[in-house]
Image: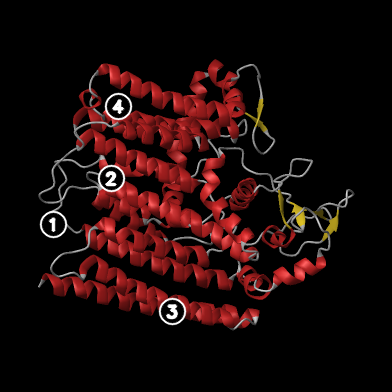
């Protein structure tokens, strides 16, 4: 009887997905007819068929084993990588938040890996000339005064592939991207460098952070350059390596977690998480490090009998790599305090381990973020400028007017919480594009799914209790407050009533442990429906992808 119900769930879900996909086919055909690009319909039908197959295969993995069901740890790599691949192709390169800057930074790191010149004399990043297609699809170029590199001509801005995603980007990928390498090489005749490659100066500045945050993407770019692949292969291979890294690290976190695997699985299935995981964004490194850090600390606190030196080293590496990317997650180090002192072998070894972890994090912070730290701690200036060049709120102002900080935090929580919630789930994908959205009903569904995954099921022991639960809430609140404070100083103009620049995706790294700490004795589910919730979240992503494709086709 149980198998019948589960099979019926898969059948109903697949039929609903098929019908909704056919409904959106009407939009795709309308957009393709208006643009004169019939191949858009063919691509959509392929996506529709793959989505239906994916829904059936996911159902088989979640429900189809009669004698022994697959564990969530075994299911996640296939589901996470499969959905990530679909997000990678539906939302093409440079479409994620700030992705062009992340791409340029990864490109610079790839040059260092290959032993090639990474920057021009003026400090700007060098790229292969044919790769300019990604940064400016229709721009004109000319050789610089030195006769070495190609530069963009004119004062007009660059039209970056995917930055404002519409049908023209799909058109460029289809018509220009597949054949652009040879023709571009013929146009750019400069012979620069000992390897005979043609180089150009990118107009986009790289991100100032630890190069480690871009190693997965840089490996993909370096491989494409070694194989002399074109720009699209380069972009997709860089994204693919980042996705593989994220899935691998999240899989390790799921394996290490002593409980709460369904919660981390659910957070990894959010549209925003999947969109970021299949991009060049350094958020992948942050999410991966914080997810694994959470798993290691909870494993040592609640399951392992003793802390080994390799565990201390792993925690130190995760904090040293993930912390400098965004300093707001330094409070996650507090999860280490959940581990009992006796598991270290006494106070002496505990202090030694704490000193090693703290020293690794501090050294990484000073090495990578010393200029940023100096800017934040300086109280000499009475005025400050935001990233947009407007007069902002300085630390001096906050120190002299402590009530201002309280007022700004209160107003922000009062007026912006809904925005944080929506953008955390993925209500605005792409470059926070409100058109490329997840429908509100699905946002509610994902939210309810996460909340249900965070509740106890029959037979499950309550693990995080008392002071440890409160401590986790304090850590998560500290991360959120640090995000708001940093954006208050960096992005909020003087006179604003709320803190500007905070995005919901900033809360994803600590969302799993926050939800795990919410399990309690008062709200307990009558039966375990976690697999059904996760399966339906997978299928909801398939619908989101079909709908996004149809929306993009209509944006002419």
In the image, is 467 to the left or to the right of 313? Answer: left
Q: Which mark is residue 527?
A: 1
Name the residue tied to disc 2. 256
Which marked residue is nearer to the observer: mark 1 or mark 4? Answer: 4
Residue 454 can be seen in this image:
yes
Name the residue tied to disc 4. 337
Mark 1 residue element: loop
Q: Which mark is residue 23?
A: 3
Q: Residue at x 48, y 60 (%)?
A: 437
Label 3: how many Cα within 10 Å (few below 14, some 14–19, many 20+): few
Mark found first going from the N terminus, 2 or 4: 2
In the image, is 184 to the left or to the right of 228? Answer: right
Could you say where residue 268 lies in the image, as x and y percent from the top left?
Answer: 37, 53
Could you say where residue 179 lies in the image, as x and y percent from the top left?
Answer: 68, 74
Q: Are marks 2 and 1 in contact (CB under 8 Å)?
A: no
Mark 3 residue element: helix
Quadrant assignment for the N terminus: bottom left
Q: Residue at x 46, y 64 (%)?
A: 85
On screen, residue 303 above or below 348:
below
Mark found first going from the N terminus, 2 or 3: 3
Which marked residue is nearer to the observer: mark 2 or mark 3? Answer: 2
Looking at the image, which is closer to me, 481 or 277? 277
Looking at this view, name the residue that lies furthest to the right. 145
| Label 2, label 1: how far apart the Cα atoms are | 25 Å
């Amino acid at each position: 009887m149980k198998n019948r119900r589960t099979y019926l769930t898969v059948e109903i879900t697949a039929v609903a997905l098929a019908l909704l996909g056919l409904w959106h086919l009407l939009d795709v055909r309308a957009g393709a007819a208006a643009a004169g690009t019939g191949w858009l319909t063919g691509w959509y039908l392929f996506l529709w068929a793959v989505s239906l197959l994916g829904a059936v295969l996911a159902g088989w993995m979640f429900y189809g084993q009669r004698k022994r069901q697959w564990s969530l740890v075994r299911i996640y790599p296939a589901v996470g990588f499969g959905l990530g691949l679909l997000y990678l192709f539906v939302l093409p390169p440079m479409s994620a938040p700030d992705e062009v800057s992340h791409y340029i930074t990864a490109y610079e790191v790839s040059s260092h890996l290959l032993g090639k010149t990474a920057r021009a004399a003026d400090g700007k990043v060098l790229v292969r000339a044919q790769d300019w297609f990604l940064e400016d699809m229709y721009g004109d170029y000319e050789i610089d005064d030195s006769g070495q590199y190609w530069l963009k001509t004119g004062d007009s801005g660059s039209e970056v592939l995917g930055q404002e995603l519409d049908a023209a980007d799909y058109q460029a990928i289809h018509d220009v991207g597949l054949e652009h390498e040879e023709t571009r090489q013929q146009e750019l005749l400069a012979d620069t460098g000992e390897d005979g490659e043609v180089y150009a100066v990118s107009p986009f500045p790289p991100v100032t952070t630890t190069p480690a945050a871009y190693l997965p993407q840089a490996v993909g770019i370096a491989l494409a350059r070694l194989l002399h692949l074109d720009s699209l292969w380069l972009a997709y291979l860089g994204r693919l390596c980042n996705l593989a890294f994220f899935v691998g690290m999240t899989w390790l976190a799921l394996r290490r977690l002593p409980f709460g695997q369904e919660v981390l699985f659910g957070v990894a299935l959010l549209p925003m998480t999947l969109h970021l995981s299949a991009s060049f964004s350094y958020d992948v490194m942050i999410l991966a490090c914080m997810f694994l850090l959470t798993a290691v600390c909870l494993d040592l606190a609640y399951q392992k009998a003793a802390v080994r030196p390799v565990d201390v080293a792993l925690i130190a590496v995760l904090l040293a790599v993930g912390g400098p990317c965004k300093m707001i997650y330094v409070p996650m180090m507090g999860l280490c305090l959940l581990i009992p002192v006796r598991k270290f072998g006494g106070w002496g070894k505990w202090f030694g381990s704490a000193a090693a972890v703290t020293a690794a994090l501090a050294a990484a912070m000073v090495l990578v973020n010393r200029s940023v730290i100096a800017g934040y701690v300086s109280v000499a200036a009475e005025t400050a400028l935001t990233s947009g060049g407007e007069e902002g709120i300085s630390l001096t102002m906050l120190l002299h007017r402590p009530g201002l900080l309280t007022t700004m935090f209160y107003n922000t929580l009062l007026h912006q919480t809904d925005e944080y919630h929506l953008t955390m789930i993925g209500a605005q994908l792409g470059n926070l594009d409100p058109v490329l959205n997840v429908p509100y009903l699905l946002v509610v569904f994902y939210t309810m799914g996460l909340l249900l995954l965070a509740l106890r099921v029959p037979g499950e022991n309550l693990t995080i209790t008392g002071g440890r639960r409160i401590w986790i809430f304090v850590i998560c609140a500290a991360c959120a407050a640090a995000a708001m404070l940093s954006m208050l100083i960096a992005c909020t103009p003087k006179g604003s009533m709320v803190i500007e620049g905070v995005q919901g995706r900033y809360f994803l790294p600590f969302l799993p442990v926050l939800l795990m700490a919410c399990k309690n004795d008062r709200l307990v589910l009558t039966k375990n429906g976690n697999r059904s919730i996760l399966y339906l979240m997978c299928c909801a992503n398939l619908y989101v992808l079909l709908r996004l494709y149809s929306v993009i086709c209509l944006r002419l």
